[in-house]
């Protein structure tokens, strides 16, 4: 499980590089910060990873000063988003395309061999979450990509067994079942 401090460090490092990242051609940007001992390494900077980290930090913020930190980070991110709206939309669209292909590949692998992919679902479904987070900002999502996501969701509904929230329980407040139904259950074997 990640901690509030882990997520906040990633957010601050990402926001400090966000304008440069938005204006670059790179989709997956190396982030210039290290984790504390014993923590997993940070993912590369992408808009999806920033939005996911913000959602997690929001859920993990319990103290007033933590909520103030989230408000500050959100304001800084929104300011950059508004100042660089076209670059943000283009980057979100490119990441959406990349993530949907990775998500499709995982579900194709599951179709072919459910037993070998079953236990990877809690990790791989993160790509579906990223698609949900990116879609509002992705200005150039094609009709074919929307149709692909709908068909992947249709397949997933057929093979998921509804159940409890599969990520850390503290995060379910920012990933409600009505929107993120794919985080509430597991794949059939």
Image (cartoon, helix red, strand yellow):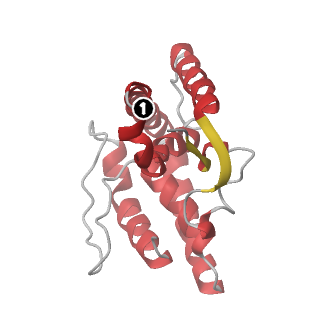
Q: Position of residue 122 (x, y in %)?
A: 48, 51
Residue at 63% in and 85% down: 63
Q: Position of residue 13 (x, y in %)?
A: 35, 66
**Which of the two residues, 97 or 121, is positioned nearer the viewer here?**
121
* Mark 1, residue position: 110
Looking at the image, residue 97 sits to the left or right of residue 175; the answer is: left
Query: Is residue 71 in sight in this rendering?
Result: no
**Which of the two residues, 129 or 162, is positioned nearer the viewer here?**
162
The answer to whether residue 42 is above or below residue 156 is: below
Tally of marks: 1
Residue at 66% in and 85% down: 64
**Which of the two residues, 94 or 118, is positioned nearer the viewer here?**
118
Q: Position of residue 115 (x, y in %)?
A: 40, 38
Query: Is residue 14 in sight in this rendering?
Result: yes
Q: Position of residue 175 (x, y in %)?
A: 65, 54
User: Could you tell me which secondary element the residue under label 1 belongs to?
Assistant: helix
Looking at the image, residue 82 sits to the left or right of residue 184; the answer is: left
Residue at 66% in and 59% down: 174
């Amino acid at each position: 499980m990640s901690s509030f401090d882990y997520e906040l460090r990633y957010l601050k490092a990402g926001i400090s590089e966000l304008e440069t990242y938005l204006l670059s051609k790179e989709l997956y940007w190396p982030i210039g910060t290290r984790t504390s001992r014993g923590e997993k390494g940070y993912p590369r900077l992408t808009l999806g990873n920033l939005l996911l980290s913000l959602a997690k930090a929001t859920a993990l913020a319990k103290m007033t000063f933590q909520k103030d930190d989230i408000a500050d980070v959100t304001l800084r991110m929104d300011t950059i988003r508004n100042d660089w709206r076209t670059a943000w939309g283009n980057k979100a669209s490119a990441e959406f395309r990349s993530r949907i292909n990775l998500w499709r590949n995982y579900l194709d692998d599951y179709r072919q061999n459910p037993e070998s992919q079953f236990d990877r679902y809690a990790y791989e479904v993160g790509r579906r979450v990223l698609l949900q987070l990116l879609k509002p900002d992705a200005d150039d999502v094609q009709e074919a990509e929307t149709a692909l996501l709908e068909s992947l969701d249709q397949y997933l509904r057929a093979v998921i067994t509804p159940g409890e929230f599969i990520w850390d329980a503290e995060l379910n407040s920012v990933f409600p079942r009505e929107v993120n139904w794919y985080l509430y259950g597991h794949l059939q074997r």
